[in-house]
Image (cartoon, rainbow, N blue to C red):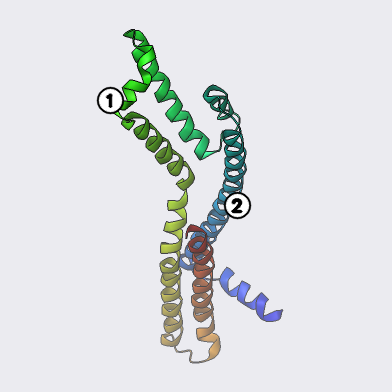
Amino acid sequence: MQGEMNILLILWNSGIVVKIVLALLIFSSVLSWAIIFQKRKTLQKVEIDNDGFLEYFKNSQNLSEIYDQTKVYVDSPVGFMFQKGYLELLKIREKLKATGQEDLLQDYFKESGVHALERSLQQGASISNDLLDRKLEILASISSIAPFIGLFGTVWGIINSFSGLASGGGSIEAVAPGIAEALVATAVGLAAAIPASWAFN
């Protein structure tokens, strides 16, 4: 317990550079954990809404009613894809209706294919993926940068240790503060990077 208090005291009395490094790493760690918990909550909601929408989709033959369910299961990527496809289908029907060919929808798909619907579904999938991937780049950045920030603090702490030796002190008391700063900076850097890297992957 006494050693722990000494380390805290050493860090409290450390230079401004090491304090800035530690502050950045602690902020990065808090930010990454906040994103991790938020993404976990989001993914749980997505899974629940997906299951609910797919269950309704399997048990219903009415496209209009299924479309209404996309407004209930708003966090379902599958529901959002259906919504984009259904709206595109309505757009095609309105186009045919305007030209008096509303009854030729089946012939339209035979002649033109379903490329418009495929594009709408792909667009829905792309938007859903973008929403799910939001803030993941922050986790990737933290996992990549935090070790190097910690390494910078480590190097700076070792420089302080050599400064202690250069000032004429060859005892452990002269080099201990710099070594402590270096080791703590390394540990905090890894503590920030490892959870962010695990969560991102």
Q: Residues within 10 Å of mark 1 (few under 14, many from 20)?
A: few
Going by the image, does 124 lie left or right of 79? left
Q: Is residue 64 above or below residue 128?
A: above
Which numbered marker is on residue 37? 2
Q: Is residue 196 above or below residue 63?
A: below
Name above or below for residue 133 compared with residue 76. Answer: below
**Image location (x, y in percent) of residue 19:** 51, 65
Q: CA distance from mark 1 to mark 2?
A: 49 Å
Dot 1 or dot 2: first in sequence order is 2
What's the residue at 58%, 36% (across, down)? Answer: 58
Residue 152 location (% of width, % of height): 41, 70
- The amino acid on which the numbered mark 2 sits, given as a three-letter code, is Phe
Taking the spot 54% from the left edge, 78% from the top edge, the residue there is: 180
Q: Which quadrant would the N terminus be assigned to in this image? A: bottom right
At x 44% / y 44%, what residue is drawn?
A: 129
Three-letter code for the amino acid on which mark 1 is drawn:
Glu
Residue on which disc 1 sits: 111
**Residue 188 located left or right of residue 123:** right
| Residue sitting farthest toward the left | 111
* Mark 1 secondary-structure assignment: helix
Which percent across, then down, holds residue 56? 61, 34
Q: Which residue does the image show at 57% across and 56% down from the upper left?
A: 33
Residue at the far bottom: name it. 170
Viewer-side label of 1, 2: 1
Q: Quadrant of residue 48?
A: top right
